[in-house]
Image: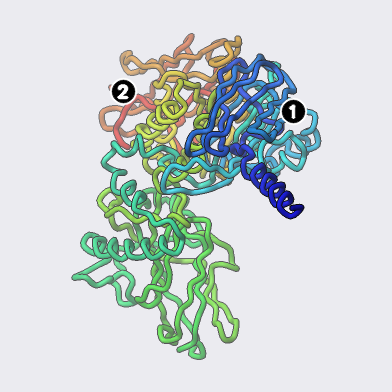
Amino acid sequence: MKQFFLTLALAAVCLSATARVEMPPFFSDHMVLQHSADVKLWGTAEPGAKVKVKPSWGSAAKTVADQAGRWSVTLRTPGPGGPHTITVSDGEKLIFSDILCGEVWLCGGQSNMEMKIEDKVTGWEEELARAASHGDIRLLRVAKRISAKPVEKIDIENDGWTTATPETLAPFSAAAWFFGKEIAAKTGMPVGLIESCWGGTLIESWTSARTYGTMERFRPQIEMLQQMPDTPEEREVFFEQQVADWEKDMAKIDWAYTDGRLVWAQPDADLKDWTACKVPGYLQFQGLVGYHGFFWMRKDIDLPTSWAGKDLELLVGAVDDNDFTWFNGELVGHTELCILQRRYPVPGRLVRAGRNTIAVRVRDDGGLSGIMGGDDNLLVRNVETGETLPLSGDWLCRETVDPGKAPVFPINLDKNYNGPTTLYNSMIHPLRDYHIRGVIWYQGESNSSAAADYKVYLPAMIRDWRLAWGYEFPFYIAQIANYMKPQTGPERSEWAELREAQLQSLSVAGTGMAVLIDIGDANDIHPKNKAEVGRRLALNALYGTYGQDVVPCGPLYAGYSVEGERIRIRFTRTDGGLRTTDGEALKGFWIAGPDRVFHPADAVIDGDTVVVGSPEVENAISVRYAWADNPPCNLCNGALLPASPFRTDYWEH
């Protein structure tokens, strides 16, 4: 009998343990809930279980879990403040403590949003030393995950929300942190920051199939994702078969093929139309602006007689973004993702004394392209002896297939995070019912080679996220900063075109933009002054969301008129009057006539306009300002906020 009752007791304990209500990990101690709002809380329990949610500030909400065990309730949160507690019970209590009600902001994008405090941003040591003094700012970091389909499960770093300490702040987004500090200081309200970003990502990864399924360009890839097997092993087989099919289609259009033979990978290829380049190095830094999509890179190496017939290891650095690599005409490796160092085995049967050929077909998804690495990962190694020979130095390159005409490349879901929808599915979709005030977004560098597309993709993503949340929250954008070699003459600039796409997205209601054209770094795509990035994003929010009397941004192009041989440029956001940041004459203006040849312009401020001309240009018809990767420019308003780059023409994309 004792054993019978013991069994019953154990069964009751087990039932209680399995019956305990569970909730997504962003419901945790220290969380921030949007104040004065109807917020949803949800989770799972045993089917049919009665769930009670009792906040410390008001009456309880009750519900019953459905047949799948799902339940949700809606609570009306109080005004800013706390701390509060919430008790959730289905018979066993789950208690969340130290909850604040305040302003919740989702912070997304690529590496400049992901850049951590501990990446030695300006003032990083002081921020870590004083982190604990900001108890009104809470942090939530979404873990990096990829998914072929939308999922409800989400992985969160640190098991949920954290207070700011040196340990929790160090790996957190610097731009988001400085934004949150400014909002908390200027509004007096608690702030919750949700970091969901990933370096090197395309905007296509962050938008749902609901939006992209209507675009012909993405339909094949989305259909491909829908067919994706569930296990990594099955996905690898699936991917390799798709790559083989893709290669057959590619052979029909790739210039590297002649009569079905992959000529450009062979040692005997005709190289008369190839261009010299350097490795390591981004090709765009070498004046090769058009190297996007598919192109080839080659190098011949001389191997000593003692290496003939010996197994080698080929280290080809980090290829931006993806590569297929051949040695003496035979494929030895293929890697997706620009950050991975390539290490390919070369069988001894391919190795000859004297001249040997390395050929790399690169697929660049956007932004910069080329082969990067140091002396320790750009070499060929004799496996037997350990001897090495360097691969850095002089290479040759040649463009091939227009990416718009190439067959759709398969997605390796376990290695490539840049498939359309794959990050939205796993890092945004599960958050859609967590009430937020708005979004700050710092991304675009990876899309710089396709700015015309970005003009469609960014507004589409803003609408997509608003549709997912079910309301029109504000969306504030960081325009990409100045980068690469300083401008010395008129230039075609993909980065300028991308900035223009970001500027034009302001036609979407409820948006704003932080112009960063003056705080970049010619030698670093990740400028360190993230405090100013956060401040300028916060100015947009303080003005547009909180109604404060601040200047949100610098002058924005509003139109022009031709006045004889000069052109007058009109602006909005001229608060406090137009001026220059350094007190000198205006810089960065260029003007052209019908021949479309741009000349340095004389530009003068006239009230809230700028009048532009040049003695070298008759019948002027177009003006460009700060139209370069890294332009000299100094136009600002009375708040010393820089003017956004712009052009009055649309002659090239």
- Along the line of sight, which residue is nearer the eye, 575 or 254? 254
Outermost residue toward the bottom in this view: 306
Q: Is mark 2 on a helix, strand or loop?
A: loop
Q: Is residue 36 above or below residue 43?
A: above
- Along the line of sight, which residue is nearer the eye, 300 or 18? 18
Residue count near mark 1 (Cα–Cα under 10 Å), binned few <14, some 14–19, many ≥20: some
Find residue 98 and name its label: 1
Find residue 119 and name its label: none
C-beta proximity under 8 Å, tags 2 and 1: no
Find residue 620 and name its label: 2
Type of the residue with mark 2: Ala
Q: Is residue 265 above or below residue 121?
A: below
Q: From this viewpoint, is residue 243 visible? A: yes
C-alpha separation, residue under disc 2 versus residue under disc 1: 64 Å
| Place of residue 622 in the rendered image (x, y in percent of width and height, measured from the top left) | 33, 25
Comes first in the chain, label 2 or label 1:
1
Task: Indicate the quadrant containing the C terminus: top left, top right, bottom left or bottom right.
Answer: top left
Asked where in the image residue 528 lies, by quadrant, the reply is top right
**Residue at position x 60%, y 68% in the image:** 376
Q: From this viewpoint, is residue 530 visible? A: no
Residue count near mark 2 (Cα–Cα under 10 Å), binned few <14, some 14–19, many ≥20: many
Horizontally, is 260 left or right of 438 in the view? left
